[in-house]
Amino acid sequence: MFDVEPGTFYARARALSAYCYMQPLGEALMLPSVDNFMMEDANTFQATLAGLKAAERELEDARQERIRESTRVVCAAMKMKDGLIVTGVRHFSPDMRATLLRIYGERYKFEVTEQGFIDTRGRFLTRAEAWKAAERHGQIRRQVSSPGELYSENLY
C-alpha cells in the first residue's frame, strides 16, 4: 500500500506481522518486547519531530532576514495615539500636515507618539530601524544627525 523506509514503525510492524504469519501454529513466538518496540519508535518520532521544528525555525529566521535585507525606506511616517500611521514626503511636510489636520484638527501635534518611516513592505520602522535599512541600501545621501537615527533630510 505505502512504501516506507526500513526502520520506520510501519515497516517494523509489517515485518513483525510477516514473522508471526510464517511461524508454525502452536509454536511459541520469540517476539521483541512490545514496550521496547514502542519506546524505540516514540523516541525516533520525537527526535524527527524536534529536527523538523528546528529546521522550520531556521527557515523562518532566514526568511525574516531576507525580508529585512530587501526592504528600503520609502517615506516618512508618524504613529498616532490611536494606532493610525500617517505618511508623507517628510515629517510635518504640507501633505502630512493636511492629512493630520483633517483627521485630528489643530491638536494633531499632541496625538503623535512616534516619528519613523515606512518601508517597501508597508511596515512602520523606528528612526533606528530605518537608519539600518537606509544604510544597508545606500540611501543615506548626507549626514545631518548623529548616525543611528534617520531623518528625512538624510535621504533627500
Image: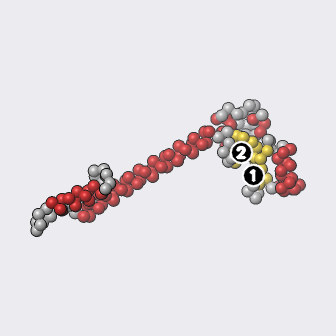
In the picture, which quadrant includes the N terminus? bottom left
Name the outermost residue toward the right: 106
Q: Which quadrant of the figure has residue 20?
A: bottom left
Residue that mark 2 sits on: 118
Q: Which element type, helix, strand or loop, lies under badge 1?
A: strand
Q: Which quadrant of the figure has residue 63?
A: top right
Residue 128 appears anywhere in the view: no
In the picture, which quadrant includes the C terminus? top right
Residue under the point 75% across and 52% down: 85
Query: In the visual, does 71 lie left or right of 31?
Result: right
Query: In the visual, does 92 lie left or right of 16?
Result: right
Q: Amino acid at mark 1?
A: Ile
Residue under the point 29% across and 61% down: 38
Give how far apart the Cα atoms at labels 1 and 2 are.
9 Å
- Tag count in the figure? 2
Residue 18 appears anywhere in the view: yes
Residue under the point 76% across and 58% down: 82
Verify CB contact (< 8 Å) between mark 1 and mark 2: yes
Q: Which element type, helix, strand or loop, lies under badge 2?
A: strand
Query: In the visual, does 70 lie left or right of 101?
Result: left
Whether residue 113 is situated above or below residue 154 in the rendered picture: below
Disc 1 crowd, CA 10 A, few/some/many (<14, 14-19, 20+): some
Residue 35 image offset from top left, x and y in percent = 26, 64
Disc 2 crowd, CA 10 A, few/some/many (<14, 14-19, 20+): many
Query: In the visual, does 51 lie left or right of 124?
Result: left
Residue that mark 1 sits on: 85
Name the outermost residue toward the bottom: 26
